[in-house]
Amino acid sequence: MKVCFLVNDLQLSGGVGVVVEHARRLAHDHGFDTALVLVREQELPSWRYEALADVRVLPLEEARRERFDVAVATWWETTFTLFDVPAERHAYFVQSLEDRFYRHDQAERVGAALTLDLPVAFITEARWIQRTLQELRPGAPVHLVRNGIDKRAFASPDAIETRLDGPLRVLVEGHPGVWFKGVPDAVASVRAMREPHHLTIVTGWPEELGELADAADRVESQLTHREMAAVYAESDVVLKLSHVEGMYGPPLEGFHMGATTVTTEVTGHDEYVRHGWNGMVVDWDDVRGTARTLDLLARDRRYLHFLKHNALATARGWPTWEQAAQFMALALLRVRREAPPTADDSAAALMSDLRGGIEAYREHLVERGDFARQVERVERLKRIGPVGKARAVWRSPAVQRTVGPHVLRAAKRVLGR
Amino acid sequence: MPDWQERITRETNPAVRVEHDLRYRLAEPLILGARTWADLGCGNGVAAADAVGGMYPGRAVLVDAEERAVETAASELRAGETVPVVADLTDRDALARLRETILEGEGPRAVTCFEVIEHLQTFVPLVELLSELAEAGEATVLLSVPNDDFWAIDNPFHETTWGEGSFAELRSLLPGGTVVARQLALQGSAVVPEGHDGEKVTVAIQPAAEGAVPTHFLAAMGPQAAALGVHAGVAQTDLDETRAWERQRESDLAHMEALHRQIARLQGENDGFRTELQANHREFEDWRRYIHELEGKLGLPLSGHK
């Protein structure tokens, strides 16, 4: 069985890590001829992944000269070149609904959504994605292969150590600059706590933390899996207030090391988090409510222990990477055995989404036209002689130092009425 | 308390035995409607024999990793034709031979594979074989996996972990038309007035799988997959046996804990002796040094030195 996974790069990230792990185990455990195909020119040095020796890493040009049983896209942009790679079957490993990573007026949002209409077999890692794909693409094959956990790195303790006192140890993890990770909200929630706490922030981008770092007792970066496991083991709670997640790995890793979670009801949480059983589910944009939930756990150590105890039990039932790779092997064998999806269904979905995309684009254009007209009116007003002079006077430092603040306050009072 | 009894025998705990019997009763129409039946992981064949009434008229391919189990199953089942197969169900070559053996028998064919997958180091080749047989319409396959995940059971005999999520994964990889069933636990009680001993009683229940936690997950695939119906089984609990069984375990556990305590105590004593010995050793060293000093001053050869 000859399989290739298309990746943008081999930079250290959760998504790429999952692909690498599957590729590695398919080669090692199942004897697959596995390759990682880099679809982009590499600008940054790649992280070294352990034991990639069994897996070939090919530039796209080289992959084009080979023939694979199954070629698998692993990120929406990699579908651009998926069909350039000669293969008996083409598949798409969907790790999240990636259009949600972009705001509604970003062009990538429509692009990412359209890739889900391709005539390919889908493999996904979370049941919520599986359900969504089955609704979006009825009839298309959608195979579920959940991510495993490296149980050697995230080696669970036999039992939870009972902590009767001391500050609540909270761990916040994620990219502070990515809006849907909710890191600023998480830090704000910890700041709003009344009970004693200790905050650890783990991020690959510490320079983007800014003033958020002031709230942390400790900031960690670029940790190996084993180092990360040690940080989880020192934590009581993994606090994640994400808006978009795929399989949602960090709280689960925390579970393995005996930490519970306080999380938003983000996609993927329902794979293993049960409110009041092994974690606490809080509302989005509710900093105060989240802080009170953390306070509750800081005060009620019996409850905290109950959640941590059940979190650890949940982790015990989660599959290893060895098991996950068995499902991936089965999925790929099945994709190869099945007839490829027909282009008709795919085209219908594609055209429907394209139409939706054009409608959204038209709405944005109308919206922007409105804004442009408003701006034009303001600009015209600014160009009137006396207005221009008044603005120049207003901007002068003398006015700003003396009457400026009084005028502003008066204006606010009037407008406030 | 977890039960690690992986082989079903006539002495098995009644609740576990009922669970096991019921899976074969579920498969009964498939088995009796088939001319060839393969039972993968047949074990001792006790439940299978009960399900088919102690006699299977067709060709029975009995497969297990242990030769003795296959032999016992063959004698329990008394099939028209028995083909005993000792095979490693993770081995592709063995599975290819098994496939041939199954297909040598006349159709229609049924394959049962209960509580096997979780014992295999790799289930990929077996699931592939079962899916192919079902998809090609060559056999109807009925398989089961346990819901270990719910109890966070770390069964030392299980190579892989199964539960709601893992079964959802498996289901997504099985052929279209696969029928899924959930096995649920029942509890009950009976009252028997004097003079009515042994009387048959029918209990009406409406088991609801939606939202219930299953003990096992089952999947049927192939031509007769839709033949599955609702089945339930209850067994009178032999409280005497159950008590004996549980007390034995409690007693064993208490005994083991006592042994652990004893080991810990001995370890402590050992540590004490070691400390004392080390202290004595240090004291003797001091004496030796002192004696050597005296001997040095007197010009005598140092004792203990040749």
Image (cartoon, rainbow, N blue to C red):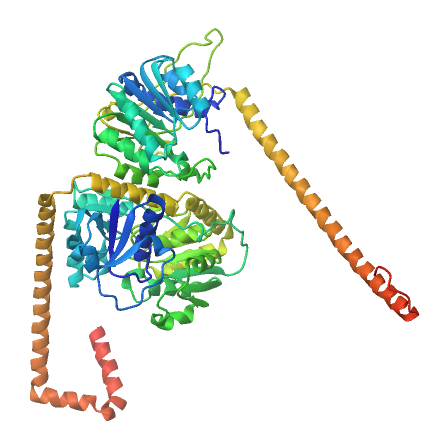
Residue at the image position 10 percent from the left and 75 percent from the top: A375
Q: Answer left or right for A337 relative to B21.
A: left
Q: Residue furthest bottom?
A: A398
Q: Is residue B148 above or below residue A348?
A: above
Q: Nearer the viewer, residue A398 or A163?
A: A163
Q: Quadrant of the C terminus of chain B?
A: bottom right
In the image, residue B202 lies at what x, y percent?
Answer: 36, 15
Q: Is residue A187 above or below residue A261?
A: below
Q: Quadrant of residue A45?
A: bottom left
Q: Residue furthest right?
A: B298
Q: Nearer the viewer, residue A269 or A334?
A: A334
Residue at the image position 46 percent from the left and 35 percent from the top: B157
Q: Residue furthest front?
A: B306
Q: Residue furthest top?
A: B195
In the image, residue A142 lies at what x, y percent?
Answer: 22, 43
Residue at the image position 28 percent from the left and 45 percent from the top: A127
In the image, residue A51 lies at what x, y percent?
Answer: 38, 55
